[in-house]
Each structure stands twice: as C-alpha cells, then as structure tokens.
Image (tube, grey):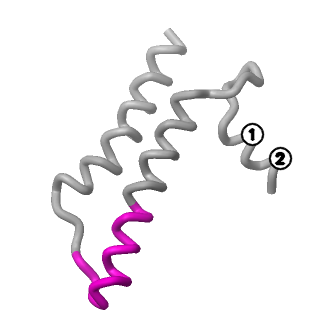
Amino acid sequence: MVELLKKIFSEDNGNSSSMRILVAFVIVIVLFNWTWINIKTGQIIAFDWQDLGLIIGPLFAKAYQKGKEKE
C-alpha cells in the first residue's frame, strides 16, 4: 500500500510531486468537511457548483500542468 502511494505521488523521474500531493490534500479536506457536515446534520447535502469546483479544479490544474511538462 505504501509503495502504491509512493508511486502515485511520484513523477516519472522518481521525485515526489508537490502538485499531486497538494491536489490530494485539497480533495481530502473538502471531502472530509462534506462528510463531517453530513454526519452532524444527519442528512446528505448535495454539492454546490462551488464545492465541485474545489474538487475538479485542482484535478484539471494538475492535468494541464502535466501536459505542459511533456512539451
């Protein structure tokens, strides 16, 4: 499991990718907060477009950044 995480958060040259780590951090924090609010209120609250932007935005930023690295 640890090896898989190292592989996921590493670039092609083996160095750690701070962009991947930060994207994962943002997604984990947003989903943790959403889960916590759902548990505290006892109901499932739908994501607003702003919440989805917080999750999808960093993923698109990482994909864009990775594409620019290859050029």
Label of residue 66 in the image: none
At 39% from the left and 26% from the top, the residue drawn is: 64
Farthest residue, direction top: 71
**Label 2 secondary element:** helix
Q: Is residue 37 magenta?
A: yes
User: Residue 70 location, x and y as percent?
Assistant: 54, 14
Q: Residue at x 16, y 56 (%)?
A: 49
User: Looking at the picture, how far across and down is residue 54, in whole percent?
Assistant: 29, 48
Q: Which residue is mark 2?
A: 3
Label 2 sits on what residue type?
Glu
Helix, strand, or loop for circle 1? helix
In the image, residue 57 lies in the stretch drawn in magenta: no
Classified by dominant secondary structure, the portion drawn in magenta counts as: helix
Residue 61 in the figure: left or right of residue 16: left
* Numbered circle sitting on residue 7: 1
The image shows residue 52 at horizontal and vertical percentages of 26, 55
Q: Is residue 10 left or right of residue 27?
A: right
Query: Measuring 77% from the left and 49% from the top, which residue is drawn there?
Result: 4
Q: CA distance from mark 2 to mark 1?
A: 6 Å
Q: Say which quarter of the image contains residue 46.
A: bottom left
The amino acid beneath tag 1 is Lys
Report crowding for label 1: few under 14, some 14 to 19, many 20 or more residues within 10 A (C-alpha): some
The residue carrying pointer 2 sits among few (fewer than 14), some (14 to 19) or many (20 or more) residues within 10 Å by Cα, namely few
Contact check, label 2 and label 1, Cβ < 8 Å:
yes
Establish if 2 lies above or below 8.
below
Farthest-out residue, bottom? 42
Up-down relation of residue 13 to residue 6 (above or below): above
Stretch of the chain drawn in magenta = 31-45
Observer-nearest of 16 and 68: 16
